[in-house]
Amino acid sequence: MDTPAISGQELDPQRQKRAKEYAWLRRRLLLVDLTLGGLYALAYLLSGLSVQLRSTLALLSPEPAIGVALFFVFFALGYGLLRTPLDYYGGFVLPHRYQLSTQSRRGWLSDQIKGAGLSLMLGGTLVEVVYLLLQRSPELWWLWTGLFWLFFSVVLTNLSPLLILPLFYKLTPLADEELARRLQELAERAGTKVRGVFSIDLSRRSVTANAALLGLGNTRRIVLGDTLYRHYSADEIEVVLAHELAHHVHGDIPRGIAVQSALTLAALYLAHLALRWGVSAFGFQSVADMASIPWLALVMGGAMLVSTPLVNAYSRARERAADEYALRTTGRPGAFISAMTKLANQNLADADPEPWVEMLLYSHPPIRKRLELGHRFQQAPAEASGRR
C-alpha cells in the first residue's frame, strides 16, 4: 500500500474529514471496551463466580501462589476472548478501511498472540507480587506494591528496546550514514548519549510515521520508522527527533515515571480500602483472597480512568515544552510546520478536536495548536518560546 497524502504544504481537507470519522469511531470503541471491562469484572463478583473459581482452584492446588496465577490466567483469558471482536474491528478492520494498515490477518493474529503472552507474563508477575504482599503485610501492602511498581517501571523502560520491541519489529542500523551522524550530533549537543540510530519496519504493519528515543542509560537509542525515513526530509526528521530529545533533556522520562507511580500509589491505597470493604460485601476470606482479583482490577481501573484527564493535561504541557525546545534548538520552524502537517495527513490525525476530547483523551497538543506554535515561532522566535 502506498503512503497516502504526505504533503507538508497544508492540511488535506479530505484527510481531515476522514480523520474526524476515524477518531469518532475509535472513541466509541473505547467507550464500549471500558463498559465491557467493567461489566465483566462485576459479573465475576455478583454472580459468585469469583468465589466459586477460588474454591475450585484451592482443591486443585493448596499452594496460594499457584492458585493466584491460575485465577489470573482464567480471568485475563476470559476477558481477552470476550473482547476479541472489538480488538479485531478496532485493530484490523478500521485501520484497513481507512487505509492506515498494511498488515495481513496472519500478521495481526501473530501480534495479538505475542501481545497476549507478554501481558500474561508481566501482569501475572505483578499480580503474584501483589498477593504475596497482601499475605505478608495486609496493612501496608499498597505501599510496598507502589515501590515495586516504581522499580518495575524503570526496569521495563530500560529493557524494552532489547527485549520487547524486537518481538514485534526488526531493528536495523540506519543505512543513511550522513543522517545518522547528524542525529547523533544533535543528541550530543543535547547532552544525551545514544547507542546508535536505528530504523524499524513500521511499513510491514502501517503507513503511519513515527520516531522515538527509546530506553534509558546504556540502552537508549534513536529509532526511526521506515515510513518516516523514506518520506521526510533530513530537516524534518531532525526537528522531530529534537522533540524526542527534549523529553530526556527536560527529565520527562523520570518525571513521568514518578508522576505515574504517585498516581498508582494513590490508586493502590483506594484499592486497600476497597478490599477491606469487599471482604464482607463479596464473601472474600480475607484481603489476600485470590477471589478479590476482579474487584482489585475494577477499583484500580476506575481510579486510573478518573486520573487520566490529569495525566493527559500534564503530558500536554510537557509535549508543548518539547515542541518549543525543538524549535529553539534546530531553528527550523519551516521544517517543524511541514513535519507536523505531513504527520497529520499521513497518520490521519484529527488536527482540531473538540475541547472536551482534547481535555479527556489527548496526551499531545492537537496538530492545529502545534502548527500555530510553529507559525508564531517563525514570526517571532523569542516571543513564541516565552509564551505558555
Image (cartoon, rainbow, N blue to C red):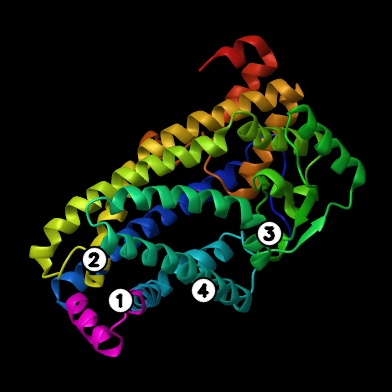
For label 2, the residue is 288
The secondary structure type at the circle numbered 3 is helix
Percent across and percent down for residue 21 are: 47, 52
For label 3, the residue is 162
The secondary structure type at the circle numbered 1 is helix
Q: Is residue 304 above or below residue 168?
A: above
Residue interval drawn in magenta? 49-68
Q: Which mark is residue 117?
A: 4
| Mark 2 and mark 1 residues within 8 Å of each other at the beta carbon | yes
Q: Earlier in the sequence, mark 3 or mark 4?
A: 4
In space, the residues marked 2 and 3 are separated at their CA atoms by 35 Å
Q: Earlier in the sequence, mark 2 or mark 3?
A: 3
From the viewer's side, name the closer residue of 56 and 311.
56
From the viewer's side, name the closer residue of 131 and 100.
131
Is 22 covered by the magenta stretch? no
In space, the residues marked 1 and 3 are separated at their CA atoms by 33 Å
For label 1, the residue is 64
Q: Residue at x 20, y 63 (%)?
A: 287
> Which circle, 1 or 3, is nearer the viewer?
1
| Mark 4 and mark 1 residues within 8 Å of each other at the beta carbon | no
Q: Residue at x 58, y 13 (%)?
A: 386
Q: Is 89 left, or right, of 109 in this rendering? A: left
> Which circle, 4 or 1, is nearer the viewer?
1
> Which circle, 3 or 4, is nearer the viewer?
3
